[in-house]
Amino acid sequence: MTIRPTGPARDAEPAAPDAGAEPAASASEASGQNAPTLAEDLLLLLFQPDSGMRAGTGTIAGEGTLYYALAGAVATELVLSGHVRPEGGRVGAGRVEAVPEHPPADLLLRTAWDYIASKPRGMQTVLAAIGPTLRKPVLDRVVERGDIRRSTHKTLGLFETTVLEGDGGARRASLLADVRAVLAEGAAPTARVAALAALLSASGTLPQFSREIPWNSAVATRGKQLEQGDWGANAAAEAVARTLTAIVVGGVIAATASQSRAS
């Protein structure tokens, strides 16, 4: 059964009404033949096959704080793609600004970029503003790509419930193999895989992957290193991008911990 997080985002600044909202275009129009976004890959990884109450169905790990993880993935992609940067070029400023005249083409990313473009923002503010409405459009894209199936069933012949089916397909298997190699086998990551592994670690869901990624102190330690931007020389990302991504991931950790204490 899918569950949409309902916790309201706390934001000291007025949030743009459409920040993080589903684009006006359909999900297929928004994604088209483009490569999946980092948020789509993260959601697909978080999908846990055969964990549902019905045979052949799955659930998404970390549902209660999923919107922070997805927001972190969107913000990270904006950073790694050069669409946002530290305010005034100073990483220590603690705020980000949009790179003028360099909006992302993807409509899902564009709504987040527009929010940041209105004025420089603290990362916690960005995550709180763009996160709460990301689940549906991101899941819609994953379903439309055929990686997960979504269907409706009746419980007790009365109540309709939506379930997620399948095993995530070849793409989830490939993503999982890449992340497992980095976390458990000492492989040097690409910037994208490093970011995915860092976000998984930050979300607190890695123990739930124990059947697919061994859960031990070495994996936990490597996850923390990735959270802090220690990606290794082969991860083709500038030092500023790694540092800013670490700030994004730190925001996910703080928000997730705060939400967990409140619930």
Image (spheres, rainbow, N blue to C red):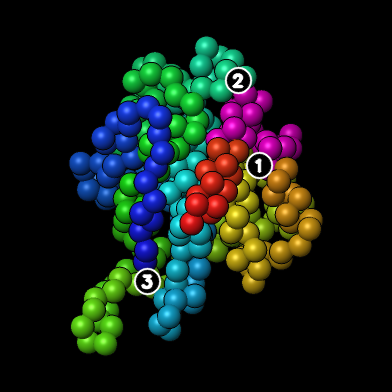
The disc placed on residue 91 is: 2
Please give left or right for residue 71 compared with residue 251 in the image.
left
Q: Which residues are magenta?
A: 226-248
Please give left or right for residue 55 compared with residue 202 in the image.
left
Label 2 to label 1: alpha-carbon separation:
16 Å
Q: Residue furthest top?
A: 88
Q: Nearer the viewer, residue 164 or 1?
A: 1
Label 2 to label 3: alpha-carbon separation:
41 Å
Crowding at mark 2 (Cα within 10 Å: few <14, some 14-19, many 20+): some
Which residue is found at the position 72% from the left and 37% from the top?
230
Which residue is found at the position 35% from the left and 58% from the top?
4
The residue to which callout 3 is attached is 1
Q: Quadrant of the N terminus?
A: bottom left
Q: Amino acid at mark 1?
A: Glu
Please say if the residues under marks 2 and 3 sit with CB atoms less than 8 Å apart. Answer: no
Please say if the residues under marks 1 and 3 sit with CB atoms less than 8 Å apart. Answer: no
Q: Nearer the viewer, residue 241 or 95?
A: 95
The residue to which callout 1 is attached is 227
Crowding at mark 3 (Cα within 10 Å: few <14, some 14-19, many 20+): some
Q: Amino acid at mark 3?
A: Met
Q: Nearer the viewer, residue 15 or 73?
A: 15
Q: Name the spot of residue 120 as percent of width and height, x first.
A: 43, 19
Q: Name the spot of residue 3 as percent of width and height, x first.
A: 37, 63
Element under label 3?
Answer: loop
